[in-house]
Amino acid sequence: METAIAAGVHINASCGGAGVCGTCKVLIKKGEVESTRTSRITDKEYESGIRQACQCRIASDLIVDILPESRMEKAVLSRENKEISSQAPMPLADGWKFSPPAKKYFVELPGPMLEDNTDDLTRMLMGLRQQHSLDDLSVDYEVMSNLSQILRDGDWQVTVTTLPDNTSGVKIINVEPGDTRARHYSLAFDIGTTAVRGQLLDLNRGKVLAQIIEYNKQISYGEDVISRIVQSQKAGGLKKLQRAVTDTINGMIAGMVEQAKVGIEDISHMVVAANSVMVQLLLGLDPKYLRLSPYVLTVNNVPLVKASSLGIKLRDYVNLYALPLVASYVGGDIVAGILGTGIYQRKTVTLYIDIGTNGEMVIGNSDWMVTAACSAGPTFEGGGIKHGMIATSGAIEGFDINHQDFEPVINIINGEKPKGICGSGLINIVAALLKSGVITQNGKFNTNLSTKRLRKGDDVYEYVLAWAAETQIEKDIVITEVDIDNLIRSKAAMYAGCQTLVKSVGTSCSDMEQVIIAGTFGCNINIENAITIGLLPDLPRDRFVFIGNGSLLGARLTSFSDDLLRDGQKIAGMMTNIELSENADFMDNYMASLFLPHTNTEIFPSVRIEKGRIN
Amino acid sequence: METAIAAGVHINASCGGAGVCGTCKVLIKKGEVESTRTSRITDKEYESGIRQACQCRIASDLIVDILPESRMEKAVLSRENKEISSQAPMPLADGWKFSPPAKKYFVELPGPMLEDNTDDLTRMLMGLRQQHSLDDLSVDYEVMSNLSQILRDGDWQVTVTTLPDNTSGVKIINVEPGDTRARHYSLAFDIGTTAVRGQLLDLNRGKVLAQIIEYNKQISYGEDVISRIVQSQKAGGLKKLQRAVTDTINGMIAGMVEQAKVGIEDISHMVVAANSVMVQLLLGLDPKYLRLSPYVLTVNNVPLVKASSLGIKLRDYVNLYALPLVASYVGGDIVAGILGTGIYQRKTVTLYIDIGTNGEMVIGNSDWMVTAACSAGPTFEGGGIKHGMIATSGAIEGFDINHQDFEPVINIINGEKPKGICGSGLINIVAALLKSGVITQNGKFNTNLSTKRLRKGDDVYEYVLAWAAETQIEKDIVITEVDIDNLIRSKAAMYAGCQTLVKSVGTSCSDMEQVIIAGTFGCNINIENAITIGLLPDLPRDRFVFIGNGSLLGARLTSFSDDLLRDGQKIAGMMTNIELSENADFMDNYMASLFLPHTNTEIFPSVRIEKGRIN
């Protein structure tokens, strides 16, 4: 595993190398390894040379195949990319002025004479005052280093780049000879636990010039934030995690600069929105205390930091701005989403949900805002599911079932032979099984049905979605009762989170005038099916809006408008976080939600049960 | 020369290695060198194996002796050290509060709980607000890096160090677990072209804990600021010069920390006062434009810079503050002197003179201040004088002459056999020669005198101060007409500078209510003799005050008081600089001053000429 990472080959490793998940299977085609065998490797696999990459020590030169289900493929990313850009009109922050925080000013200075030989910096500051009414600018020391030569190279005509500083002032970060205003770019990044999304922005025209999505290379150190935190506590772990994400970012920057034919020296600013753990890891701040009660972050309003000091390959004058965090599990990605969607500007009470391994939700409007996060588990990303996988090529996503013979109709991402089940597929599968009566409302199989698809597997019942011969992995792809249980727990956590949150402000889900589903995973779920299984509240369907990646949206807008940059800080400040993990109400709601769709059928009126089934 | 520098052995090299000064003589005792011979090496010297270090290329392993006159000895430094500390009471800035810019605050914070799990930084800022009324603090990003652990290591009791930032705010630079207030130190440095003076300060008690003086290792790259600038324009030159001075500083810091038994991590602040060229070189800023008309500095008010980023071995949180500069040749050392002596606080019109290779003068009071600098040449440091040397062991300093037989009485620093003549000695020698009639008022020898001490040397007349047998260098030590000419030019530049300056504000030297002589060289000059040769204006002697090193004084006080730190900026802002180098009045005054004491005898009434001599 470590060698693969060092070689830039990133293998799926849900558990971060602990040996317990079995997602990092590789086939040793040639050469010797010493390996510990765990129960995740069957006898047949072991004999054929399959091993868990994380359990192998290299004993000779090797030729290794990564098994299809362990591969991290890019196909999904381009698919995702397309879907983001084809989104319908969505709620957006309004009324802001296009005025990027990073600004370029062109100044023409009188050259020095004996009668006026003030120092170069003062001359430039006077020019900025007279020609642009800029006062009280502070200056990054680094600007001094070549200032005299730059002023003379530009024949006393220079372009000055400024940025709001950590307090309420503005600072000079760069001076260039001549007029470079036409070349003025920035970067917006959404750094997710699984994927990193970046955009190269034109700060003159407010346009996206290039966009790339990549897996976060930290995936090799574990699938969820908790395993990343655990990893960070090992010797050198924090540095490794920081390097993994900066490597990811550097590759993306190189790619975008290349795509857009932009000079790296013309990038002046970088805005990052990310969950709290991703922010702390990017900044190299030990996230240890985030996962220990009482869940304390090092810093919510992160001071500006030079991107280059973190290992990001940008010029020294590029400051990285991280959208402010709210709590351990409510990060800058959520603040960015609230910012981008303009929820904080409207009277409408909105529920904002970001479904993922970590589920975040916000309720509020222009006057107030409460937020909470719950650990939904990796189910929605395909984790903890026997044949689960992320939503990439070969994942079963669309699903229906014949109510007579219980034969499935499956739809696979990219139309390949199936390799496994992705999160959105899982929702569709469980909804279909429920509606067809293959499972009951408590998630157990109706073992009286007569179909060879339903069988007892290793100790538990399972339903065969695809026979071995039809698959890429040459194994039956099944969904087990354990898988369904896991999904029920995940959706219960999300739903109970929303319920607890709405109740904390004395309202109910039905009072939500709008529900915004954020996140790429959210984009791909089927609303009807999500309501059927009780993941989303049962509201008129036209109240639901998908916004795709709200985090990247907010990061981009922050880079376009200093009004919005300030608004982001305001939003973070107005959010009251409710810690669900130690909330008794949440536990009650959670227990009551461990049913399909819910033990209280009254709150899911549109999901009607007939003949023991749900229609 | 380069090898000697690399080995840490610093040889006198007035011309910076150009081969023209002959001050870097060494004796090759064993081994081979390839060397270019210049006229600075006599036949006898050449035969005995003496070479100019800067003209030698090493061809084999060598054993080399540095000739006594080329050595840079520390003896003078300890002597100087003593004299500074034994200074009489002097004019000092008044009415300031002891309140160092670098401040430590101890805060006791409530630990986080679920009901109060705000981020660590906000918690600390709230504590500072509540317990110390500190608002709107900004935070250096680096403070984040280990903040969470430090707060917990200190069991929520920490010491926070703050510093005024570049604008009008205050920033947090360091946080330490527990109560570290008792250990709170800073450094004050005067970085001179020749010598660097440093003090380690206790910021709790306002005391000097240790003090070291060292030669500036840049000396090996030339004796005066012009040759340093020339050197900086060579490939890699700027870096070399920066490294030379940071090496000097690092050695001194190590020494002072050792002397005072202070932990390097307890030093939070560093204040530097230096001339403009020294500041730009220390900061690594190309000084090229300082010596080209119209003489423009990169920056007067230098933004704070991390000392470690310049190569100074202090913790990353130590910011270096450089006292503001006024012009190319009026630097932070002069601002520091005006600050330390409190001239800017009083109504008394004061003339402040810093005599050296570069002579600086200021006239003013609490309402106004004008300043000028002139190039006096290296004469006062012993440069450009046949047997000139810096004021170290073996230098002839005290001098008198028998008016009958014209035999000399000499007094040598440290009582050794003489090696040469130092600057203060030169003044005494010329004054004595003038008063005894050995020379005339235009600096020429009275060749009618009957004494074997007066003779024609290489083309010019010279007076033998010491016969070879009485010396360390085994050569007659003489003063030549060329030497006297050089001194006249140097003193004329200084005096004309003062005259031009006083005239520029419509006053005259006699209106000066106080004359403050700053600089270590200034300390050692004899006022009577200095007036006799026309270096200083002929005023009542009680108006003269010596303050020793005004620059270090000002740097120290700046580190003790943020009032004074602000005053330093005010002083720099109120100074009007007069560029003498292109001033017609100055040229006239200079020409008129090329006489002993002056062509206009009326302005030197106390220097009376009798029988063709001066009494």
Image (cartoon, coloured by chain):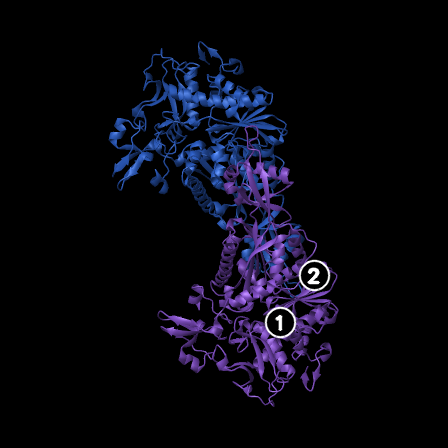
Chain colours: A blue, B purple
Residue A586 lies, with reference to residue B240, above or below; the image says above
**Can I make out residue A473 in this image?**
yes
Q: Amino acid at mark 1?
A: Ile
Q: Residues within 10 Å of mark 2 (few under 14, many from 20)?
A: many
Q: Position of residue A31 (x, y in %)?
A: 25, 39
Residue behind mark 2: B343
Marks 2 & 1 on one chain: yes
Write the residue at 71% across / 66% down: B514
Q: Position of residue B15 (x, y in %)?
A: 51, 72
Give the vertical position of A531 relative to B68 (above or below): above
Q: Nearer the viewer, residue A424 or B401?
A: B401
Q: Quadrant of the N terminus of chain A?
A: top left
In this view of the protein, can residue A118 be seen by the observer? no
Mark positioned earlier in the residue sequence (2 or 1): 2
Q: In this orientation, which residue lies closer to the viewer: B68 or A91?
A: B68
- Helix, strand or loop at mark 2: helix
Residue B325 percent across, percent down from the top left: 62, 60
Q: In which image quadrant can residue B424 be found?
A: bottom right
* Residue B480 pos. (x, y %): 56, 82
Tell which subunit mark 1 falls on: B
B463 up-or-down from A34: above or below: below
- Relative to the observer, which residue lies in front, A600 or B181? B181
Residue type at the position of mark 2: Ile
What residue sits right under mark 1 in the picture?
Answer: B525
